[in-house]
């Protein structure tokens, strides 16, 4: 019996980032995980995802992430996170945040990036609740979460989805910042040691981001995979 289902956003430009995210979350877990890649091509082939291509979408999973409850059969708890994460903590600790009154739990950042671009030249958008949706612990049984049907995900605006307007404010639970620690924004001195580093602007798999914080730890994980 799987203890926690995990869905990771997969992007063809960042396949190695996905590999490291998957490897690091499994390496540090003390519970059994079922890890699934959310691949847009598969969802399109199966006619689950039918949205038109959005030129402003920075990743292939910009919208498909919200299909996590559907992919989990609207049952139990499921964790989604972007592919540009590196884990140091044990996701078993997230069980303490599984409040049945909440539709979703996340790190509630007040993040306003200064950069105008990120990763491989993608535009850096600024909007309320930015990065909340990059790490979401879904209560898939919750009535508000069950609103996230393929029909809704395929038709609603990005603002509605990413700002979590599908849930009431008091249905959004708070997770400590350590679980979505934003490289380049958070600091160890002010925010403590991360349990999961999020390379939100760009990570060591891109040429121009070789010297970001925790780059060496990421490269070590990548080397362990190769071995």
Image: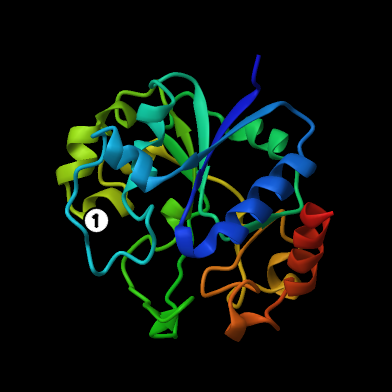
Left/right of residue 216 with respect to residue 142 in the rendered view: right
Query: On screen, 19 above or below 1?
Result: below
Q: Tell me which residue sits at (46%, 57%) in the image.
A: 11
Q: Tell me which residue sits at (42%, 75%) in the image.
A: 112
Determine if residue 223 is in view. Answer: yes
Query: On screen, 81 above or below 122?
Result: above
* Number of numbered markers: 1
Left/right of residue 66 with respect to residue 216 in the rendered view: left
Determine if residue 167 is in view. Answer: no
Of residues 8 and 183, the one drawn nearer to the viewer in this rendering: 8
Whole-percent x, y for residue 135 in the image: 51, 49
Q: Tell me which residue sits at (61%, 72%) in the image.
A: 203
Query: On screen, 27 above or below 209?
Result: above
Which color scheme did the rendering employ for the protein?
rainbow
Left/right of residue 189 with respect to residue 206 in the rendered view: right
Whole-percent x, y for residue 60 in the image: 37, 56
Query: Which quadrant is home to the C terminus?
Result: bottom right
Count residues near mark 1 (Cα–Cα under 10 Å), then give few for <14, some for 14-19, many for 20+: some
Query: On screen, 158 above or below 122?
Result: above
- The residue tagged 1 is 158
Q: Tell me which residue sits at (14%, 45%) in the image.
A: 155
Question: Quarter-wise, where is residue 38 in the image?
Answer: top left
Secondary structure of residue under mark 1: helix
Query: Which quadrant is home to the N terminus?
Result: top right
Whole-percent x, y for residue 171 in the image: 38, 36
Whole-percent x, y for residue 36 in the image: 53, 36
């Amino acid at each position: 019996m799987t203890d926690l289902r995990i869905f990771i956003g997969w992007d063809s430009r960042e396949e190695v980032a996905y590999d490291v995210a998957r490897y690091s979350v499994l390496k540090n877990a003390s519970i059994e995980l079922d890890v699934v890649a959310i691949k847009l091509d598969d969802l399109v082939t199966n006619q689950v995802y039918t949205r038109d291509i959005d030129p402003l979408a920075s990743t292939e999973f910009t919208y498909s992430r919200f299909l996590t409850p559907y992919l989990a059969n609207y049952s139990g708890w499921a964790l989604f996170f972007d592919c540009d994460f590196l884990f140091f903590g044990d996701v078993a600790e997230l069980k303490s945040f599984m409040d049945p009154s909440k539709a979703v739990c996340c790190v509630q950042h007040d993040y306003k990036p200064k950069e105008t671009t990120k990763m491989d030249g993608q535009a850096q958008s600024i909007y309320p609740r930015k990065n909340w949706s990059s790490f979401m612990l879904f209560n898939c049984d919750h009535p508000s979460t069950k609103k996230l049907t393929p029909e809704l995900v395929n038709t609603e605006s990005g603002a509605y989805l990413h700002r979590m307007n599908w849930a009431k404010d008091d249905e959004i639970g708070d997770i400590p910042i350590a679980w979505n620690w934003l490289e380049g924004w958070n600091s160890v001195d002010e925010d403590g040691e991360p349990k999961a580093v999020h390379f939100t602007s760009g990570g060591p798999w891109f040429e121009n981001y070789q010297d970001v914080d925790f780059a060496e730890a990421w490269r070590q994980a990548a080397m362990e995979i190769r071995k």
